[in-house]
Amino acid sequence: MNAKASRRVLARTMAAKLLAEPDKRQHWVKLLAAYLMDHGMDDDVDLVINDIAHELYLQSGHLIVEVTSARELSGSTREELEAAAAEYLADHPPANGNGPAPTKPVEDLRGGGEPAEGPEPDIRKIVDSIPRGI
């Protein structure tokens, strides 16, 4: 019976195979899955995948991801940044297809020494809302 290989060895080997033979990646992934199952390492799948991603980065110098669009928002005021964000969202809708992401709530700020104008609170309602008999 063969000894179980370490996760690091598996990751290095898989990364080398995936980089050398990208057209056979499905074959290599199936072999890895079979190996993990045969050696009782099926609980370590997430760890092995992360190790392979790290090895792919180390061996090829880049991560295997596609970035379709990324740019820094520009503007010196809040309004300019919000306008740039709105323009970006119009050009690049979120991947979930549900429209723009929810906006940040609007702040209702008051000065420290100036209470907000409004009716005086009803003291009787406040007293009645306090639980008793606990």
Image: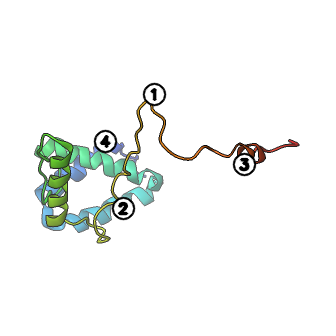
Horizontally, residue 115 falls left or right of residue 120, namely left
* Residue placed most toward the observer, 97 or 115: 115
Q: Quadrant of the C terminus?
A: top right
What x and y, as percent, mark residue 84? 14, 53
The x, y position of residue 12, in whole percent, is: 23, 45
Position of residue 98 in the picture relative to residue 17 (left or right): right
User: Which residue is painted at 60% across and 43% down in the image?
Assistant: 120
Q: Mark 4 points at which residue?
A: 8
For label 3, the residue is 125
Under tag 4, what secondary structure?
helix
Say which label, 1 or 4, has the lower sequence index: 4
Q: What residue type is labelled 3?
A: Lys
Q: What element carries label 2?
A: helix
Q: Which of marks 4 and 2 is nearer the N terminus?
A: 4
Residue farthest along the bottom direction in this orientation: 97
Decide which of tag 1 and tag 3 comes sooner along the chain.
1
Marker disc for residue 33: 2
**For this rendering, which residue is in front, 29 or 63?**
63
Q: Label 2 amino acid?
A: Ala
Quarter-of-image position of residue 108: top left
Distance, label 1 to label 4, CA atoms, is: 62 Å
